[in-house]
Image (tube, rainbow, N blue to C red):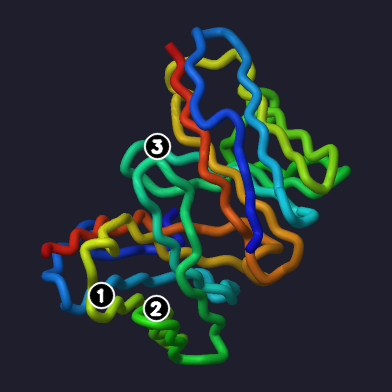
Amino acid sequence: QQQVKQSPQSLIVQKGGISIINCAYENTAFDYFPWYQQFPGKGPALLIAIRPDVSEKKEGRFTISFNKSAKQFSLHIMDSQPGDSATYFCAASIGGGGADGLTFGKGTHLIIQP
Amino acid sequence: GAVVSQHPSWVICKSGTSVKIECRSLDFQATTMFWYRQFPKQSLMLMATSNEGSKATYEQGVEKDKFLINHASLTLSTLTVTSAHPEDSSFYICSASDSPNEQFFGPGTRLTVL
């Protein structure tokens, strides 16, 4: 049972464009929704995270949009740059990001074309 | 920021041998550590959660006698893959937290079993 569904599996965006990655979850007990960036051979690094009491959070070029009723959340990368090329994972957990293990989506391989 | 290290970064071993992977929190005390497994081009799957001084809690389907986890101190957790076989070849990633708010990931360990 996949509790967090992520799409698309791969994405190609032109430099300067907006990259959009979507996730949907099933478990309504989830209350912490982070996005991670992973480069080949490296561990994931936290980009941005949101809790269900807000509908949007922005940090620099990265924005999370959260729709609690639809059980969906998305990552928007504005002004995408070649250095953003990586694999992105959405995740979810119960009780905060550090108290419980994370359930990850399958990942999106993002390529930013110069 | 919070730094988590893993050692070794990669290891090659023969089938039937045991391999130990260390996970250290370098600048904070980790009350909880997590171990994940990632197959090539796939997502991270939580294997187990460990709290300092307590037995690890394993996810369904993870053999606790095969993947031994020890969290003996607030800065060190070890994962021992016993009697490793080629199907155990994977990328093993640990994470650590000192609060309910966030977990910090290590760089991962690439295990290849011949």
Element type at mark 3: loop
The answer to whether dots 1 and 3 both sit on one chain is: no
Side of B9 where A77 appears, left or right: left
Side of B46 where A37 appears, left or right: left
User: Mark 2: which amino acid?
Assistant: Phe
Q: Which residue is mark 1?
A: A20
Q: CA distance from mark 1 to mark 3?
A: 25 Å
Element type at mark 1: strand
In primary-sequence order, the first of circles 1 and 2 is 1
The answer to whether dots 1 and 2 both sit on one chain is: yes
Q: Position of residue B62 (x, y in %)?
A: 59, 35
Q: Residue at x 42, y 63 (%)?
A: A4
User: Mark 3: which amino acid?
Assistant: Phe
Label 1 marks a residue whose chain is A
Q: Which residue is mark 3?
A: B39
Specify whether residue B7 is in view: yes
Q: Position of residue A51 (x, y in %)?
A: 56, 82
The answer to whether dots 2 and 3 both sit on one chain is: no
Label 3 marks a residue whose chain is B
